[in-house]
Amino acid sequence: MQTSPQTQSALDLILRARHQVLSGEELSYDDAVALTQVSLIEIPYLAAAANEVRKKFTGDEIESCALSNIKSGNCSEDCKFCAQSAHYKTDSPVYPQISVEEIVEQAKAAEKMGASEFCMVSSGWGATNGKEFEVVLEAVRRISSQTKLFVDCSLGFLTAEQMIRLKEAGLYRNNHNLEASRDYFDKICSTHKHQERMNHVEMVRHYGIHPCSGGILGMGETPEDRVKLAFELKKIGAHCVPINILNPRAGTPLGDIPPLEPMEIIRYIAIYRFILPKSTIKIAGGREVNLRDLQAMAMQAGANGLIIGNYLTTMGRNPSQDIQMLKDLGFKMMDASPVSSSVPMAVSGASCCT
């Protein structure tokens, strides 16, 4: 059976990209955009090549992260995807920050269910007020000393002083997603700027904390926007890259947006692995509803991380199902304790098309 010229051209592109990245070269922006155009039938080849890159640069260990929504709702920002924004009327839960004891109890439960990382998430622009921040600090100290978990937090925009104190308390990572490319960001948020998010992630790295930053696919952005976001994440040295897939929430401006097809999600997981060969690429919110029966295939497209358990305002599936899926795929569950604490620098000269 002969291969059509179009298919052969796509396969040549995939093989060239594979060879370049496995050889230590960087994928160009133009080639990354070209990979967004390969046909549906060619995506499994793209996924397989990306999985080779994953195996070479990050091995078979997988990070499994559990989230705790320690403070929910009433956020002053107007991010159009977010059910916790006070600008929209949704059914998202609203409650004040929970106690240190509750946070630590949740962390210990997460460790028992198989998580290697625990992330405390608080809604709002600023991290917390004085008392709330002290609660977070104490929770970081206790989780660091009483479990083997990586300790992560996502608290909005932190100050340099807060970064230093969190690092001293034992924080391993700080999550601050770019959410969308610079060119598309103004279409999803007007209450702060993309550059502010970029600056924050770079500050995280400056103070010796591993930067976690990713985005959301399926908000109406173009394929080029998705590629630009990956190169922006490369530029700021994102150590861990959560890939969320929009799960539209009723009451938000994006509540009626059509969902991405599962194979399209797999396409971009693979492309992100080519662009970010050494990062943890973590499949995050929206995977169950959007990937459906193709979750295992998505994990074979270059990903090496997974959010397990529930999300901030939506339910996930039983963690035991995810742990079994990962073992069936040949992954090894990561033990947090022996991991190096060194923080990778941003990639010099990394850029997108601009």
Image: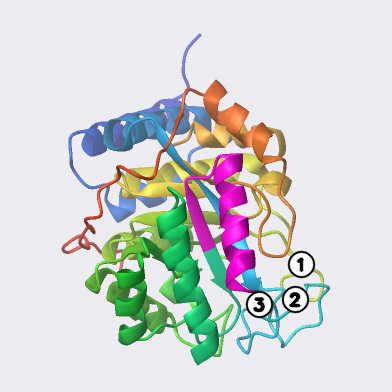
Question: Element at badge 2?
Answer: loop
> Do residues under tags 3 and 2 come within 8 Å of each other at their CB atoms?
yes
Residue 154 colored magenta? no
Height in image: 180 above or below 79? above
The kind of residue on which mark 1 rests is Arg
Which of the pair 73/23 is nearer the observer?
73
Question: Element at badge 3?
Answer: loop
Q: Position of residue 79 (x, y in %)?
A: 61, 79
Q: Locate residue 208 relative to residue 232 in the image: left or right.
A: left
- Residue 13 at least partly seen: no
Q: Residue at x 27, y 69 (%)?
A: 205
CA gap, disc 3 and disc 1: 10 Å
Using the image, tell me which numbered label, if any, was put on residue 252: 2
Tell me the magenta residue range.
Answer: 99-119
CA gap, disc 3 and disc 2: 6 Å
Q: Point out the residue furthest to the top here.
A: 1
Q: Which residue is mark 1?
A: 249
> Do residues under tags 3 and 1 come within 8 Å of each other at their CB atoms?
no
Q: Residue at x 47, y 51 (%)?
A: 117
Q: Residue at x 34, y 65 (%)?
A: 232
